[in-house]
Image (tube, rainbow, N blue to C red):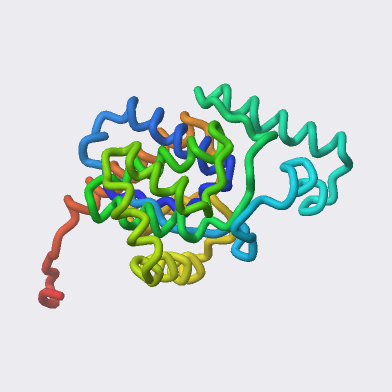
Amino acid sequence: MKIQIWSDYACPYCYIGKRHLEQALEQFAHKDEVEIEFKAFELYPHAGKTAVNTTQQRIEKKYGKTPEGAKQMIAHIETMGERAGLNMNYADVKNTNTFDAHRLYQWAKSQGKGSAMNERLMQAYFSDNLELANHDNLARFASDVGLNGDEAKKMLASDDFIQAVKDDEVEAQSVGVQGVPFFVFDGKTATSGAMPVSSLLGLLNQVYDDNQADNLTGASCGIDGCE
């Protein structure tokens, strides 16, 4: 079973949804048969290279919240993260452009470190509160997962993996991604949002059972011939 997940490193529900999926997989009898592919989606494609406002200011502007409403939204997200077992300091995240972070993931994936890099980038944003557009930070994250930081910096200074990220974003449009996280199971069953662990486990079992049924349905012949 292949699961594609469109997400952004600045998306709190993506981090929570990712953890919920991991927890569901721990309960899934066929977890060793599951392949996960992370796909790029930019929530803030026009964001700059450095943070220019606080999380509260950004939420007030984006969602039309009052200062108190923004604080409540931040607290709610942090509580959701805590329940998922995550240490999320959402109040102090530094929102910047994430395009190069997605490129770094693609590069790490080509080096066999995609899953570790995805987790490190999420942790860097939500727990360490580091800017993800900063190449020095990104190179350090590469070192943290066992890759060469200097090679990472060299890659980021080039045009490598730009097209790979753009291809993910084009594909997102073609499959109807409106928000993230967005999950596609085996290219046919899609769902969005940070779903509860129980719901994700139910989906895993449903898709697996459907696949097993498909495998048992082969070509056949009738009285008028074979098709």
User: To which quarter of the image does residue 74 belong?
Assistant: top right
Residue 90 sits above or below residue 60 on the image: above
**Observer-nearest residue: 97 or 195?**
97
Residue 90: x percent and y percent? 64, 35
Residue sitting at x 84%, y 37%: 69
Residue 127 lies left or right of residue 183; in this view the side is right
Q: Relative to 142, is 78 above or below?
A: above
- Is the residue 212 above or below the residue 123 in the image? below
224 left or right of 80 in image: left
Residue 16 seen in the figure: yes
Q: Is residue 4 visible?
A: no
Measuring 41% from the left and 38% from the top, which residue is drawn there?
Answer: 119
Q: Residue at x 38, y 54 (%)?
A: 104
Q: Quadrant of residue 165?
A: bottom left
Closer to the camera, 95 or 185?
A: 95
Q: Compared to 64, does 28 lie above or below?
A: above
Q: Tell me the quarter of the image containing the C terminus.
A: bottom left
Say which residue appears at 49% left-offset and 51% top-offset.
Answer: 7
Towards the viewer: 104 or 8: 104
The spot of residue 219 in percent (x, y) is: 13, 64
Side of 45 where 200 appears, left or right: left
Residue 201, position as x, y percentages in the image? 40, 33
Q: Nearer the viewer, residue 227 or 155?
A: 155
The picture places residue 66, in percent across and down from the top left corner, at 88, 42
